[in-house]
Image (cartoon, grey):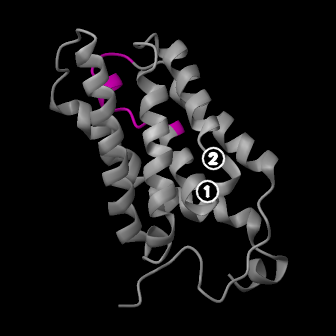
Amino acid sequence: MNQARAIKPTEILLPVNPLFIAGTLALAFVLNLLPVTGNAVLWRPDFVALVLVYWLIHYPRRLGFLLPWLFGLAMDVAEGALFGQYALGYTALALMATLAHRRVLMFDLVSQTVHVLVILEVVKVIMLLVRMAGGAEFPGWLYFLGPVIAALLWPLLTITLVIPQKTKQDADRA
């Protein structure tokens, strides 16, 4: 059962630069704001949620709960959504990711992907319940495809975001 891991257990990583965290979150926010047409809005992955999950699982003390809540409010305004929908969803995401961070890091990338999928789907359900409580109709089952696509991006995201933290010696061996 020796499946690929992004970080080897014996590997020591450099501390993450707070500017790098901010840059990845800003890039994810911009990706969320890219215009899409038709039903693609329903199944588009939530890049902010995915990057928030990554940083909350790997460095839960760096982000806390305030930053996800603020990003949620920003997404509420940007999407014109029911105010508080994303804020509540991202805060719940922060809670789930923080509570599960030690467990998730013990697993290989495939198992991590399953954990991330569950977290993202629960967040999507919370946001849907808030929308429906505000009077919106059920958007259809394609609404739940976005977290699946986001979870499939998890291994690529994990491998990419750990690269700047590797030491020069580790990078030469890889």
The picture places residue 43, in percent across and down from the top left corner, at: 31, 32
Point out the stretch of residues depicted in magenta.
37-48
Query: Closest to the observer: 33 or 83?
Result: 83
Query: Closest to the observer: 32 or 70?
Result: 70
Disc 2 marks which amino acid?
Answer: Gly
**Residue 53 vertical position relative to residue 100 in the rendered view, above or below:** above
User: Which quarter of the picture shows residue 165?
Assistant: bottom right
Residue drawn at x 17%, y 20% is 138
**Residue 48 vertical position relative to residue 162 in the rendered view, above or below:** above
Specify few, some or many for label 1: CA neighbours under 10 Å numbering under 14, 14-19, or 20 or more: many
Disc 1 marks which amino acid?
Answer: Pro
Discs 1, 2 touching: Cβ within 8 Å: yes
Quadrant, the N terminus: bottom left
The picture places residue 160, in percent across and down from the top left corner, at: 62, 60
Q: Is residue 147 visible?
A: yes
Query: Is 168 left or right of 122, judged from the image as shown?
Result: right
Please tell me whether mark 1 sits on a helix, a strand or a loop: helix
Q: Is residue 34 visible?
A: no
Residue drawn at x 59%, y 86% is 9
On residue 164, the disc is none
The picture places residue 122, in percent across and down from the top left corner, at: 30, 43
Residue drawn at x 63%, y 36% is 66
Quadrant, the C terminus: bottom right
How much space separates mark 1 and mark 2, taking CA atoms?
A: 6 Å
Query: Is 95 left or right of 170, judged from the image as shown?
Result: left
On residue 60, the disc is 1
Magenta span includes 92: no
Specify few, some or many for label 2: CA neighbours under 10 Å numbering under 14, 14-19, or 20 or more: some
Identify residue for label 2: 64
The picture places residue 49, in percent across and down from the top left corner, at: 49, 40
Residue drawn at x 16%, y 32% is 141
Please tell me whether mark 2 sits on a helix, a strand or a loop: loop
